Image (spheres, coloured by chain):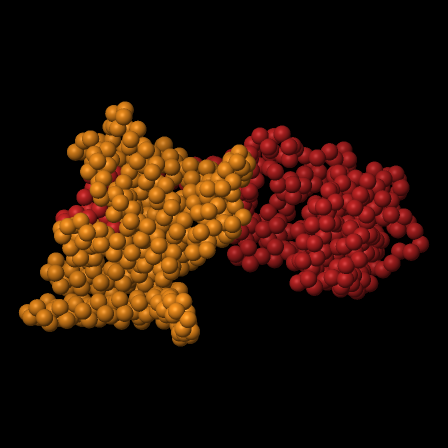
Chain colours: A orange, B red
Amino acid sequence: MLFHSVAFVVFFVIVYGLYLALQGRTPPRPRSPRFIAQNLVLLAASLVFYGWWDWRFLLLMLATAGVDHLVAVRIVQSDRASRRRLLLLVSLVSNLGVLGFFKYFNFFAESVAEGLSLLGIEAHPALLRVALPVGISFYTFQSLSYTIDVYRGHLRPARSIFSFWLFVSFFPQLVAGPIERATHLLPQVENPRRIDPAQVDLGVWLILWGFFKKLVVADNLAIVANAIFAHPERATGPELYLGAVAFAGQIYGDFSAYSDIARGLCKLMGFDLMLNFRIPYAAASPSDFWNRWHISLSTWLRDYLYIPLGGNRRGTVVTQRNLMLTMLLGGLWHGAAWNYVLWGAFHGLVLVAYRPFQRRIDRVAAPSSADPTDRTPPPGCRGLKLALLRLVMFHLVLVGWILFRCRSLQEIGDYFRGLFAGWSTLAEALAGTHFADVVFFAAPIVLMELWQHRTGDLSAPTRLSLAPRALLYTVLLAAMMVWGVRDAVEFIYFQF
Amino acid sequence: MTEPTQAGHLHARGLPHEFVRDRRRQRTVLLLVLTASLLLAANLGAGVLLRRFSPNRGYRLIERKWAMLEAANSPLLPVDTLILGDSSGNQGIDPRAVAAHFGGRAVNLCTVGDLLLLNDAWMLERYLQKYPPPKRIILAHVYDVWQRRPRARNFTRVPVVPAVGEMAATPPLTMTPGERITLLTDRFLPLYSENESVSLLLRRPLYCWSSGITEAPPSFAGFEPRPAGASGAIERNARQHLHGLKRTRGGLSEANRAALARIDELAAAHGFEVYISVGPVYEAFANDPVYQRFWGESEAAIRSAVAAMPHVHLAVPRPTAAPLGDLESVDHVSEIGAAIYTSNLLRSITGPRMTK
């Protein structure tokens, strides 16, 4: 069930109607029948939402979550460290086993066979012929963080299996995040929510802006990116560059749209989900980029992988190893394919290469004031350096997106070879429809983010007074009517 | 992946934040109401703009012809010969030649093929409500209209099709609830339903203005001649048609059969004759077996239906093969082709070999 489908609109209207009816004028008391009913409505809705794709995978999700809940309860009950470690291991094996089986089995089997064939040994691995459960990487990481946090003593287990199931399967963020931490979302599940008009106001904006980014920006840029990435060997350098920019806009528009809509829907119901993006293409350094892009995953990997590996506390070599490992696994999290591994490795290398210069770069990249909302432009020379750093970082990200989007090593080779050829045709590319489309459809998001960047306020449009704000909303809705791509295109991150 | 810090939370130096502003519920409601009102106004404005400047030729053609019929004190009406049909007739049959041949007056009210013969029946009914009956009706349609079924959204611009309530005209257009919603949306939300026209006007206003695509073409009593098409484009067009025909069976759809029966009924009641003319097609296309199979099936169905209708005659029972120079597209004649087509049609109507 896609957010931008009639089925979802009908579904949400029904669910929200029931939710509001149970909410009443005053929030229900904890553990009151009204509150329990409200959570049951959300759980049932989440199961219907997920089952809409494939009901069989519901059982898988409920089973792995059930194991995690049981493990968490036993961890708290146990006073022996070895038993607690063993229980955590059960959770890790259960979650990563299911993820590995469904997502990575074929990839590893094929890779081993290809490796053997290079040694002259023919192998015919048995491959799985099953569909990948939608959003498995998202909910697995979410569920895993719960048992780890309980093990670490940061969290007590959920009060009931139903609360935990709702935490894992909560429909707005189930299939494409943000990957919520139990420490943040579980208390909201277990306690009555207050529907705050201010949050609803922000939620309406997030939903509207999310739909605009998906339907107008991402899906139109996808048309350009798909056309160019389909045959990189036939395109000229300027066209390939344009294709990479179009894909950068598409993937950001698409993924951040999902996050915005998910967060907006939650705000309507009194929930708060974590921010997942903070104007990522304004990043001036690699670390800055990962503070802004897919924040829920990058912080997850930092807290549950990078720091447990030792982080940056054990010298340069170990730090670099940790960075590479974290980024490689971050790449692999996206999918079982070598291009994702390459994408992760590339970003790992960028982080490794950046570390020796980190202090010098950060002196330019970090704002002059301690106040995060102070957006005073940096003085002359530093402003230029900052702009240059942003430009360099954006192009490093573009290189990453080419690796991410290409489907084979051959295609990656074709793309990078072609990128440096045929620049004599620049004028033709600039006069072409692809260029006009990229400029036209990327312009709204660029302008909006310039505004957000200048004010330091991601919810800048909500600052407007009533009339200009209504005008802005009307323009966005009208643009969706005119330029919104009609065939419902799945969100890119559903596949992960 | 995030810049590694030993602190367990994201360090957010210089990063933008989300601020929640104090709002009252009434303000959000007011914002939504105002937005909805502005959106409605934008659609109304777009509707007005599109009535004058729409680059959608089909919509404008339907509006022009219905406006000619509905106009009070039209200098062109009433007529002795009423020409109804689709775009092949609109640019193929010259009412001046028809009037010169039969005497009296003639007008061409042909629209587009997607309205099928249903629109012919409705226009004729409306004409008879306003004027004395004509002496004859010419129904000019292209070869592939006959088997088509109605799609509700094509009828957005037809004034006798109401968005809500039952149709007064016969035969009525039957619509599912979903189709009715689509029709409502199409009629009242032109930003959505005519998005391509709006997009063209907004993104390429200079092109729209300089190319004249938003202007009405010259009209001679409803006849709107077109220049000859490029041969390559016609060849490509022929290939597209053949590709489509491979998966399509010829015939006469229920909607078209009902419309034809209604026209025959009106002819009997008001005492005039109806002449069907099937428009010419490109000669190489006419020789293709895929086309011949399709047309054979359509012609058999049309002949069988017409046999039971005493006032309906097949004047040009099958598409004549036309050379490239006479055509604008594979099944639409150019201005030169129109003169030949009209003259052949008139000869057939008055000649001895009229078929049932």
Q: In this view, does B148 lie above or below A257?
A: below
Relative to the observer, which residue lies in front, A483 or B164?
A483
Q: Position of residue A33 (x, y in %)?
A: 20, 63
What residue is shown at x 40% (from left), y 34% (from top)? A471
Q: Where is residue A451 in the image (x, y as percent from the top left)?
A: 33, 33
Q: Is residue A428 above or below residue B112?
A: above
Direction from residue A16 to residue B74 in the image, left or right: right
Q: Where is residue B302 in the image (x, y as percent from the top left)?
A: 77, 61
Q: Is residue A195 visible?
A: no
Relative to the observer, which residue lies in front, A100 or A168?
A100
Q: Position of residue A323 (x, y in %)?
A: 23, 52
- Residue at the limit of the structure toward the left, as seen here: A79
Direction from residue A389 to residue B253 in the image, left or right: right
What residue is shown at x 22% (from left), y 44% (from top)? A355
Q: Is residue B308 above or below residue B43?
A: below
What residue is shown at x 76% (from left), y 54% (from top)? B285
